[in-house]
Image: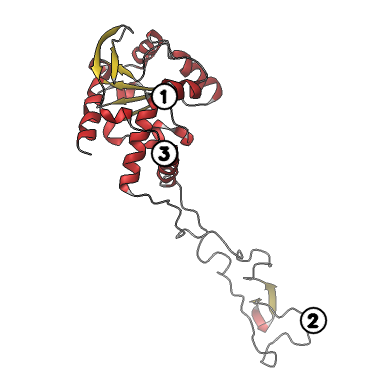
Amino acid sequence: MKATVYSLEGKALKQIDLPALFESPGREDLIRRAVLSEESKLYQPKGNYKFAGLETSARYRGRKEDFGSGKNKGIPHLPHEVLPGGQLGKVKRVPHAVKGRRCHPPKPEKKIIELLNKKEIRKAIISALAMVADRKVVTSRCHTDIGVSLPIVMEDSFEKLAKTKDVSAVLEALNLLRFVEKACRTGTKAPLIVVSGGTVLKAARNLPGVDVVCVEKLQARHLAPGAHPGRLTLFSEAAIAKISAMGDAQ
């Protein structure tokens, strides 16, 4: 499988051979599981204060015959605040009391991370990479035709761009700036940029909906946001070389 390398002006420079993993079968089920697993690691654990509703002087006078019990006084047999003179105050601590503890509050120790085997995650990323090179899948996700060959590979000078306006000019030359404008209007995802490093990591992240990531930190949720594969993706030539090395090490 071959890909066209484009210049910063949007012109085709040459053809390169893509790694064999771009021809792997697409496994949407694995991609979905990997995305859910990766997103679960971003969740914030929730839980209330351990002693919420319990920091009070209220206590329950257990046996009805004990001294100071509420027997035959027309008051409920519940934890009451301790007042001077042995009097009983308001009911506290129990869930149905004012400012009482919650019945079944969320617990921060609850396991909210979906675990997945490393081999499954690796296979999911490979499947997602293969599907960003599938024109039919990408076109279906973008709801329009893409005017360049897929996957989109840029020359290595693309990684040296230091200003957002320069990255925007490259996208405009490739007729891809319309997806950024759409993301600005609708809040959807714009193209993904995968590089091996460089100043473009900071320059491209200011564009609405655009995600830029190093190839070493590439995850399935980047390639398939919302567990929907086929995101429009730009690769640098150096990033393709690292992906090729990753495929050889498999």
| Placement of 74 over or under 65, stated as above or below | above
Q: Name the residue under label 2.
A: 74
43 or 246, which lies in front?
A: 246
* Residue lying at 20% horizontally and 34% vertically, measured from the top left: 248
Q: Mark 3 points at which residue?
A: 31
Is residue 233 visible to us here? yes
| Placement of 188 over or under 108, stated as above or below | above
Crowding around mark 1 (Cα neighbors within 10 Å: few <14, some 14 to 19, many 20+) is: some
Secondary structure state at the residue bearing disc 2: loop
Q: Which colour scheme is used?
A: secondary structure
Side of 245 relative to 179 (left or right): left
Crowding around mark 2 (Cα neighbors within 10 Å: few <14, some 14 to 19, many 20+) is: few
The numbered dot on residue 210 is 1
Measure how far apart labels 3 and 2 are at the Cα level.
64 Å
47 or 56, which lies in front?
A: 47
The numbered dot on residue 70 is none
Give the amino acid at mark 3: Ile
**Badge nearest the viewer, 3 or 1:** 3
Secondary structure state at the residue bearing disc 1: loop
Quadrant in the picture for residue 68: bottom right
Measure how far apart labels 3 and 1 are at the Cα level.
20 Å
Q: Quadrant of the N terminus?
A: top left
